[in-house]
Amino acid sequence: MTLPSQPFQVNLHAVVELLSTHIYSHPSVFLRELIQNARDAIMTSIEQGTLAPDDALIRITPVGPESSELVVTDNGAGMYREDMAELLSTVGQSSKRDIFDLPRTDRLGQFGIGLLSCFMVSDEIIVETRPAAGGEASRWVGRSDGTFTLEPLEGTSGAGIKVGTRVRLTPRPESRELTMYARVWELATLYAEFLPVTLEVCGPRGTERFVNRTPFFTRHLSPSVLPSETGTLEEGSIEDLHAWALERDLEHLAEYGAELLGAPPLDMIDISVPETGTRGTAFVLPASPSPGAKQTTRAYMGGLLVSESLPDLLPEWAFFVRVVLDSTGLTPTASRENFVNDEALAVTKRAIASSLRAWILSLAENDPRGLQRFLAIHDLALRSLAVHDAELARIVLPHFTFETNQGRMLVSEIVAANPRVRYAETTEEFRQLAGVIPSDQIVVNAGYVYEKDLMRMLGEALPSASANPITLGDVIAQFGAVLGADAEGAERVRALAETALFGLDCDVQVRAFTPEDVPALYVVDPNVLRSMELKRLEESTSGFWGDLMREVTAAPSPEQASENSEPGLPTLATLVLNWNSSLVKMLAGIDTDDQVVASRTLRLMYVQAMLAGHNPLRPADRAILNESLSDMLALSTNLMRRDISVEDFLEPGDGHES
């Protein structure tokens, strides 16, 4: 007997709009929901002992030439008519908010949400079911106008309904493509390829294809599980067969990793969280990701896809792996496209981070070559982790390389040369220091990301070593003043340099320091260096941005205003001339008639010192470089006309004595 049509207890149109705009990311998820419903029904039958696992089957028949309906059938637990009525009560809540609160761990609640999702593609849903425990079949028909019918199927009308559940959908024209074979196969493979229940998609002309493949990523596999001496095993023994099976499974896992990453993974790390029933594999990327990249996780629940790219499950430093996992203990959100952020998820996050960290520690302690291969690709990731993990830093810090004034060196090599390590905190300062540090001393460049923090941790990680910052001021303070008989010559060189560099915002000092082959050192505070860069941009930029740059550079900072007695007074860089250099001493003894040569030589030394310190050249600096080279060429080739005097080579204001 067919019962009269009854209305849903909610505005169905509003609920469907809610599902499509606020819960589900795409209408195609209706198929995932139907597969989930079928899987839950089958698992219930298996748990109750009414169905053998090998006999479980979900069959999908897409829309095609022979049928205008999409049909999803399972041989699971089925439902009584009373269950159907309870289902209607479950989905027929009184407000939209209740849809979000439907229990996803309860089978009927899950089934109800799955049914509602079908209204995104169809105006009518037919559910025919027979309970596995015995009883008559029932049919429920829901319509998009907000009405439904529920009837028992007795006699011949119910004879064709087998144990389990069959859902039939007639798609709307705009949704027909989602229910046809090609799209259904694609979606079924995406959502359910690792489902522990056999899933069959019926193709054209009666063909059948099975979606399922083995989830090797859940089998606790990694290269470390292989026996260390497989060659010594007796051929055909149980141990030999076990090792062969492990090798085969690892090959399959590596093939899946290559499919996922687009290249064979560098390594594979087993992930296991028994507390939340979570198992998986972390695939180490074979190439460094782009800067700022954050890896996502491919997550399944009971073999059914939750998300292809689940964010925030990995720690920020773990951008060197792509994780694939399956869980039975995490709680899905209403959309089943993420997990609820609860204590179980927090436990899982911590366990994944711990597994990745343990793998790195194992590499450092047991496989130094493997660690170096990893560092060659993912050095930055490991540095970011070591900064926040003192125990890890103790093990891996000796394996890091740093830039030094003697080239890139391992920390272990730096400490072996001198356990009292000195480092520059900025790259700019290191570049200025590198030219004047004696060749038998090592200074580390700690100006790159994480490196200053790692240097500060050196003493804690390696108790036999210590690390302290060194500044250019510390080095210059050790430069010797020029005294005695040489003082007059040094002062003469300083005066010549001040005249030659007039207008370039550069002070001049003469000191004695090593190495002797460094004639000059250009010293500039990082703040001054930034001001120089702004000035350079100002001079090379026009229009609105040029005006803006001029406004920025015109106003002194509060610090400058407090330090300078005259507001707006520019802070000078300093050119430190090395009295130990033979070139500088030659300048002290140069004849007055050769002042042009001295002036151009000092200007070239100035530019050379700037370039040696990797400082930016302003337009004025480039101009004096070109002019000095041209003048030196003319002087050295004796191409000067006799009617040209020395004064013609001097800038206005340059001094000259006849």
Image (cartoon, grey):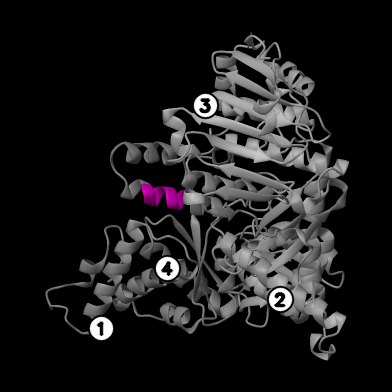
Are there few (<14), some (14-19), or many (20+) residues within 10 Å of tag 3? many
Residue on which disc 4 sits: 606
> Quarter of the image containing the N terminus?
top right
Q: Residue at x 68, y 28 (%)?
A: 158
Tag 3: amino acid: Ser
Q: Can residue 466 be seen in this snapshot? A: no
Give, as a three-letter code, the residue at label 4: Tyr
Residue in front for this viewpoint, 530 or 484: 530
Residue 543 horizontal/vertical position (percent): 28, 39
Q: What residue is shown with label 2?
A: 370
- Viewer-side label of 4, 3: 3
Side of 508 relative to 89 (left or right): left
Disc 3 or disc 2, which is closer to the eye? 3
Q: Secondary structure at mark 4?
A: helix
Q: Residue at x 37, y 57 (%)?
A: 618
- Reading the image, the residue beneath label 3 is 122
| Mark 4 touches mark 3? (CB < 8 Å) | no
Q: Is residue 21 rendered to the left or right of residue 550?
A: right
Q: Earlier in the sequence, mark 1 or mark 4?
A: 4
Q: What's the amino acid at mark 1?
A: Ser
